[in-house]
């Protein structure tokens, strides 16, 4: 007999709040909501701009988990493995599977914090529970090029490009992107605030295609303004030819002779820009696919919800999306029979 899925949400920022709303829209019961500061003491429904649901936002994770025993925990807090480790451990210890949007959890086997990864993997195995990192990468930066590769006879390269418009990211990102500088002033050693974002997806593509990675190359290139414009957050006119963002390019070399590469462009919005993603396959035949606007917050949140059934039914451990079927819309997410192997 199927039982309604009960969820706990950790983090009610922009993405966490959207995910919580999507959970309710799919008929999944939110039984606990944990946040560090905002909305404390408020009903989750009220915090989301909806009718009350009878669950109050708290900062006490231990009490929230022990009193509700959720089936699934959604962790939408920090980005690093070590940062989320305490809360993920606590969720596993209370019998919950975990989905996180932490970027470093997407392909944890290449993460530098291997001790934390192994600790979480061992605990998940011991508790018979699953951890999965997912988000916008799942469909757009991983499964989309893998799906496209299925139409190729031969492949010598898979090359992607994605754009994240940075106007809403805040001053620290704008400073890191060296807005307004001359291209010549951007050092070859410049750091992109999201330089690691595509490393995991590229490794996952290699894994799904059976490619063995032998080397990794990363470079950062300036992105220049096409014409004069006045972005609100920059507080000044940006002239044509000045730096308007950075492009972090990652290349993986494989023993099979297939090169995987992707560029992460983060820049201020100019006329005609969008949060696009595109992939090109070099081979027989040459193939190209482009999505003009990823709607990052919505698609990240929807992917999390669509992965719930996969995670509950998956074997235990710290998994990646390549261990599961490709993400797809799941209209029957609200109730499921657990079936672990």
Image (tube, grey):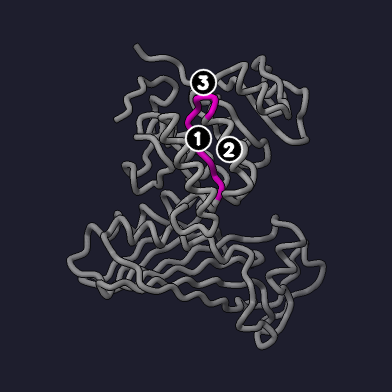
Q: Secondary structure at mark 1?
A: strand
Q: Quadrant of the C terminus?
A: top left
Which residue: 72% across, 72% down? 229
* Magenta residues (range): 93-102
Which residue matches tag 1?
98
Q: Quadrant of residue 284?
A: bottom left
Label 2 with label 1: CB-CB less than 8 Å: yes
Q: Quadrant of the N terminus?
A: top left
Q: Nearer the viewer, mark 3 or mark 1?
A: 1
Instruction: Tell me which label, 3 or 2, sits earlier in the chain.
Output: 3
Q: Nearer the viewer, residue 323 or 219?
A: 323
Instruction: Tell me which label, 3 or 1, sits earlier in the chain.
Output: 3
Which residue matches tag 2?
75
Which residue: 34% across, 65% down? 288
Real-space CA distance between mark 3 and mark 2, rounded to the nearest whole angstrom: 14 Å
Label 3 with label 2: CB-CB less than 8 Å: no
Q: Secondary structure at mark 3?
A: strand
């Amino acid at each position: 007999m199927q039982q309604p899925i009960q969820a706990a949400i950790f983090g009610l920022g922009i993405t966490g709040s959207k995910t919580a709303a999507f959970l309710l829209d799919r008929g999944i019961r939110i039984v606990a909501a944990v946040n560090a500061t905002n909305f404390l003491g408020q009903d989750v429904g009220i915090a989301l701009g909806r009718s009350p649901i009878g669950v109050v936002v708290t900062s006490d994770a231990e009490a929230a988990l022990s009193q509700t025993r959720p089936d699934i925990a959604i962790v939408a807090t920090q980005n690093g493995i070590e940062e989320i480790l305490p809360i993920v451990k606590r969720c596993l210890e209370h019998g919950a599977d975990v989905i996180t949007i932490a970027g470093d959890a997407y392909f944890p086997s290449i993460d530098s914090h291997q001790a934390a990864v192994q600790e979480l993997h061992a605990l998940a195995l011991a508790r018979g529970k699953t951890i999965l990192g997912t988000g916008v990468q799942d469909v757009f930066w991983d499964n989309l090029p893998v799906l496209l590769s299925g139409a190729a006879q031969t492949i010598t390269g898979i090359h992607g490009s994605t754009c994240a418009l940075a106007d809403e990211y805040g001053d620290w990102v704008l400073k890191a992107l060296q807005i307004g500088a001359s291209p010549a002033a951007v050092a070859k050693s410049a750091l992109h605030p999201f330089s690691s974002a595509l490393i995991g997806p590229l490794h996952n593509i290699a894994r799904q295609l059976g490619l063995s990675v032998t080397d990794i190359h990363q470079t950062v290139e300036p992105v220049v303004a096409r014409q004069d414009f006045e972005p609100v957050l920059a507080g000044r006119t940006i002239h044509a030819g000045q730096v308007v963002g950075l492009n972090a390019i990652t290349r993986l070399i494989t023993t099979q002779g297939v090169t995987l590469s992707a560029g992460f462009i983060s820049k201020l919005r100019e006329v005609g820009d969008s949060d696009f993603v595109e992939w090109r396959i070099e081979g027989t035949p040459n193939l190209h696919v482009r999505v003009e606007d990823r709607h990052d917050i919505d698609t990240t949140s929807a992917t999390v919800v669509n992965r719930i059934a996969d995670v509950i039914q998956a074997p235990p451990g710290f998994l990646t999306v390549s261990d599961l079927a490709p993400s797809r819309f799941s209209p029957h997410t609200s109730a499921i029979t657990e079936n672990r192997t």
